[in-house]
Image: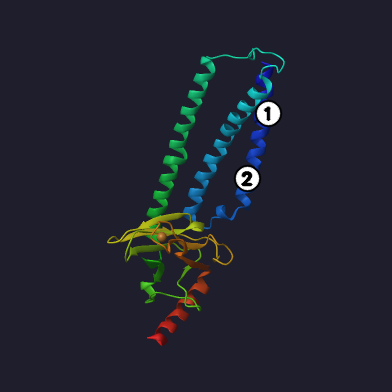
Amino acid sequence: MRHIWIFGAIWVVLTAIAEWALSSYIASDPFYSVEGVQAHIALDAFDFLLRLVVPVGTFVTVFILYSILRFRADRSSQQDSPHQFRYNPAFTWSWVGVSIALNLLFVIHPGITGLQQLWASAAHAQASSEVDVEVSASQWEWQFSYPQYGLEDVVNQDGQDELVLPEGKTVKFTLESEDVVHGFWIPALGQKKDVIPGMTRTIYFTPTVADDTSHNPMMRVQCTVICGAGHPYMEADVRVLPQAQFDAWVQQQKKLSASGS
Ligand SMILES: [Cu+2]
């Protein structure tokens, strides 16, 4: 009985430390600094799973280490350790029961509840998206057009492809590939979708923070499907601008395309 109390105390303390370390890691790691409505749904699911997995991980670790250290055979003795048992039905069935309960919980939340949130958010986005962006993927380049504004294959002042989005607005992306399968991913916005030749697919993002690739490397377009030698470099810069600046950018691009053609 004493061992159970000591084990429990170590487990609780280690779990508390691990949860604290996890929180500070997530808070400081740019990979988790999401800046979009849909991304927050995904991060909440991830966060919930990780938080419940920590006590399981510390339980197994403490269990093994405590058993090894506390119940090892005496060095001077040729005998096995006296603290041994082969069957412990109470423990076995508790373990099986807790595992089943946790897995069922994960299926319900964040599994079903998270999917419902994502679907609701997609339906809402579909009804309310205000900006259309046509994305063309090819080996190994992303090109962005804005049919509403008559802008095709926009580039920044250095001539690089660039995706510019208004802050707080839902954007509908129409994805097409000119050659092979690519993957359209903006890490900071938390979702991705394969871009498949011969198909037109759509995805919606609602960026919530004005940010750009130079401040946050996760705010970029990245190909996620190995599509040939240039795949790792198939990236494009993203700039999320407050609405007024976005409007000014549209006007500037319109002037540029008028003078260029
Ligand atoms: Cu690729």
Which secondary structure, mark 1?
helix
* Quadrant location of the C terminus in the rendered image: bottom left
Q: Residue at x 57, y 14 (%)?
A: 85
User: Which quarter of the rendered image does ligand 1 occupy?
Assistant: bottom left
Q: Nearer the viewer, mark 2 or mark 1?
A: 1
Q: Position of residue 206 (x, y in %)?
A: 46, 60
For this rendering, which residue is in front, 233 or 15? 233
Q: Residue at x 42, y 49 (%)?
A: 118
Label 2, residues with CA under 10 Å away: few <14, some 14-19, many ≥20: few
* Quadrant location of the N terminus in the rendered image: top right
Residue 11 drawn above or below residue 17 = above
Residue 4 drawn above or below residue 246 = above
Which secondary structure, mark 2?
helix
Q: Position of residue 60 (x, y in %)?
A: 58, 29
Disc marking residue 10: 1
Q: Amino acid at mark 1?
A: Ile
Q: CA distance from mark 2 to mark 1?
A: 20 Å
Q: Position of residue 40 (x, y in %)?
A: 51, 51
Q: Is residue 258 left or right of residue 217?
A: left
Labels 2 and 1: the sequence-earlier one: 1
Label pair 2/1, CB-CB below 8 angstroms: no
State which quadrant residue 255 falls in. bottom left
Q: Which residue is mark 2?
A: 23
Q: Residue at x 54, y 44 (%)?
A: 47
Residue 42 drawn above or below residue 212 = above
Q: Position of residue 117 (x, y in %)?
A: 43, 47
Report how many numbered discs are placed on residues in the image.
2
Q: Is residue 23 left or right of residue 206?
A: right
**Does any atom of ligand 1 lie closer than 8 Å to the CB of label 1?**
no
Residue 104 drawn above or below residue 208 = above
